[in-house]
Image (tube, helix red, strand yellow):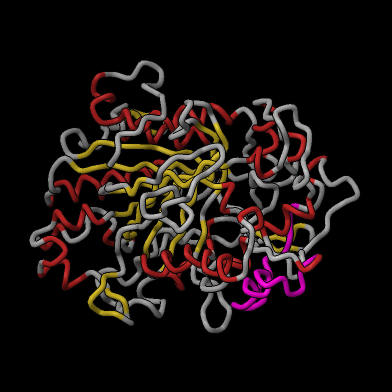
């Protein structure tokens, strides 16, 4: 993995022990501190008592308040704060390490309830982890347990991420970005820890405990014995709350702040938490989706693929304002909503004032108009003025749903605001993107659909009308396997 630094060297004078294997956690700690002043702790209306966590690690639907309707759109919001912490192993884990990690995760859940008020914790594993097992990817252990593609049994459901068609990469000669022209790196981490909570203090406490603080939830608790076993390579913090992107933009004097919708949970002013736009957790597991060969009772039956990417957002270009905040030709809401959704027709034309506070509603239905909707937009069929234009949602829907039109991916993305991978070291808006899908191949296909380079070339769609692609720079990508909860601590080690 490329050694990229966020420019942060430590938090609050860490001890030597913390620096040894906790330095990679510093970036998330700083980011959490940076926007906690603008974030509020929501008052959650409790639903039915959910009971114990199920075997699908990332299935928290029963533990967050039920969906609600905002501006006629049914949405559901997850925890306000999320941290993604990646790690590389320094040696192959043992059975004792497996017990240690299992106990550590249990300790976190004992001290903090499995709820937005406490901490949700998931663990996932990259290909480097499975290569460490006896025989590696071609050995009998992995071959006997890792699910394969139903349509191509020679391939595993877990494959490495690849550059997207519009990522800056030698694989895409000629692709450049106007402001953040950063090549994508395919990372090679062994582990990914995902921690979520409404309370930033809870996440800081758990991160510090993993880093060697020896305290958890205000009481002494020996930290897990991670020194010599792994090192944290990065940490990325994400927030998700209505109005928080605007508060962060105002607090930091961003030139386009006046155009960020003050009710939106996302940087671009449009909510993407629509209930009908994301699959239930069970549908994206290996035992519940068509692309995988797993059946109930298999070792990884309730597992899934988690894609993680880090994206710098060129919001000054998206909102089309100059360095003094003066809007340009593409700044109107009616333009931006077509880049996000579709032009066949646009879901909204916005308000009379197309600029102030976003210029239009933040909550719009994520309507499925069939897999051919993007093609109609590319050909200018039913678009305003017959323009050849692609929308982000319409291109995604080319392959993101099953035969019945139901989503086959579970998104868990949100805004970030940090300096990671920014060439000049400045703090910039980010999209911290993660999604749970039934196979790595499914995600790669979905990402190609999202870019729709084929449709753009075949139908003379200008680059300026190709959805959101020109505004986004993915700098890191990796795929991970999320095991079932019962095997979340160093899977398959008990068989070695």
x, y (%) of residue 205?
A: 41, 32
x, y (%) of residue 451?
A: 53, 61
Q: Is residue 462 above or below residue 229?
A: below
Q: State how many labels appear.
A: 0
Indicate yes or no whether the magenta region holds residue 189: no
- Is any atom of residue 233 visible in this view? yes
Determine whether, in the image, residue 94 is placed left or right of residue 114: left
Determine whether, in the image, residue 119 is placed left or right of residue 232: right
Determine whether, in the image, residue 102 is placed left or right of residue 219: left
Determine whether, in the image, residue 119 is placed left or right of residue 329: left
- Is any atom of residue 118 visible in this view? no
Q: Nearer the viewer, residue 49 or 211?
A: 211
Measuring 58% from the left and 79% from the top, which residue is drawn there?
405
Residue found at the very far right of the displayed protein: 352
x, y (%) of residue 249?
A: 67, 32
Measuring 36% from the left and 37% from the top, which residue is drawn there?
234
Q: Is residue 110 above or below residue 18?
A: below
Image quadrant holding the N terminus, namely: top left
Q: Tell me where the magenta segment starts and ends, as one range.
A: 362-384
Q: Quadrant of residue 204?
A: top left
Measuring 67% from the left and 53% from the top, which residue is drawn there?
271
Image quadrant holding the C terminus, namely: bottom left
Q: Quadrant of residue 172?
A: bottom left
Magenta span: chief secondary structure: loop
x, y (%) of residue 122?
A: 38, 52
Q: Nearer the viewer, residue 420 or 67?
A: 420
Indicate yes or no whether the magenta region holds residue 364: yes
């Amino acid at each position: 993995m490329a050694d990229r630094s966020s420019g942060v060297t430590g938090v609050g004078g860490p001890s030597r022990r913390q620096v040894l294997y906790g330095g990679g956690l510093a970036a998330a700690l700083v980011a959490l501190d940076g926007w906690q002043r603008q974030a509020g702790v929501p008052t959650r209306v409790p639903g039915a008592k959910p009971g114990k966590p199920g075997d699908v690690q990332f299935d928290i639907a029963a533990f967050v308040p039920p969906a609600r309707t905002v501006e006629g759109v049914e949405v559901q919001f997850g925890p306000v704060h999320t941290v993604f912490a990646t790690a590389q192993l320094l040696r192959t884990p043992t059975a004792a390490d497996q017990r240690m990690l299992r106990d550590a995760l249990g300790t976190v859940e004992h001290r903090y309830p499995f709820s937005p008020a406490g901490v949700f914790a998931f663990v996932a594993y990259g290909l480097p982890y499975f290569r460490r097992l006896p025989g590696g990817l071609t050995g009998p252990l992995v071959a006997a347990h890792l699910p394969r593609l139903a349509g191509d049994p020679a391939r595993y459901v877990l494959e490495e991420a690849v550059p997207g068609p519009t990522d800056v990469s030698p694989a895409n000669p000629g692709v450049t970005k106007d402001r953040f022209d950063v090549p994508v790196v395919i990372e090679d981490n062994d582990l990914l820890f995902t921690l979520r909570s409404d309370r930033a203090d809870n996440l800081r406490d758990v991160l510090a405990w993993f880093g060697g603080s020896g305290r958890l939830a205000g009481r002494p608790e020996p930290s897990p014995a991670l020194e010599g076993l792994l090192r944290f390579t990065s940490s990325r913090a994400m927030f998700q709350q209505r109005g928080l992107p605007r508060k962060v933009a105002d607090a930091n004097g961003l030139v386009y702040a006046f155009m960020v919708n003050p009710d939106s949970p996302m940087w671009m002013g449009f909510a993407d938490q629509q209930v009908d736009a994301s699959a239930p957790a069970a549908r994206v597991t290996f035992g519940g989706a068509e692309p995988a060969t797993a059946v109930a009772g298999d070792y990884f039956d309730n597992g899934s693929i988690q894609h993680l990417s880090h994206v710098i957002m060129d919001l000054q270009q998206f909102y089309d304002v100059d360095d003094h905040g003066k809007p340009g030709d593409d700044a109107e809401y009616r333009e931006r909503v077509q880049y996000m959704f579709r032009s066949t027709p646009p879901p909204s034309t916005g308000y009379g004032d197309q600029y102030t506070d976003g210029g239009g509603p933040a909550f719009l239905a994520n309507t499925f108009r069939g897999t051919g909707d993007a093609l109609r937009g590319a050909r200018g069929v039913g678009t305003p003025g017959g323009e050849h234009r692609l929308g982000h949602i319409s291109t995604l829907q080319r392959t993101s749903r099953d035969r019945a039109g139901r989503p086959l991916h579970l998104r868990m993305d949100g805004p970030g605001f940090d300096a990671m991978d920014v060439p000049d070291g400045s703090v910039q808006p980010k999209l911290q993107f993660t999604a749970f899908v039934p196979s790595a191949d499914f995600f790669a296909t979905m990402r190609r659909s999202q870019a729709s380079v084929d449709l753009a070339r075949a139908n003379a769609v200008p680059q300026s009308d190709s959805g959101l692609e020109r505004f986004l720079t993915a700098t890191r990508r990796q795929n991970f396997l999320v095991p079932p909860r019962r095997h979340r601590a160093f899977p398959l080690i008990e068989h070695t």
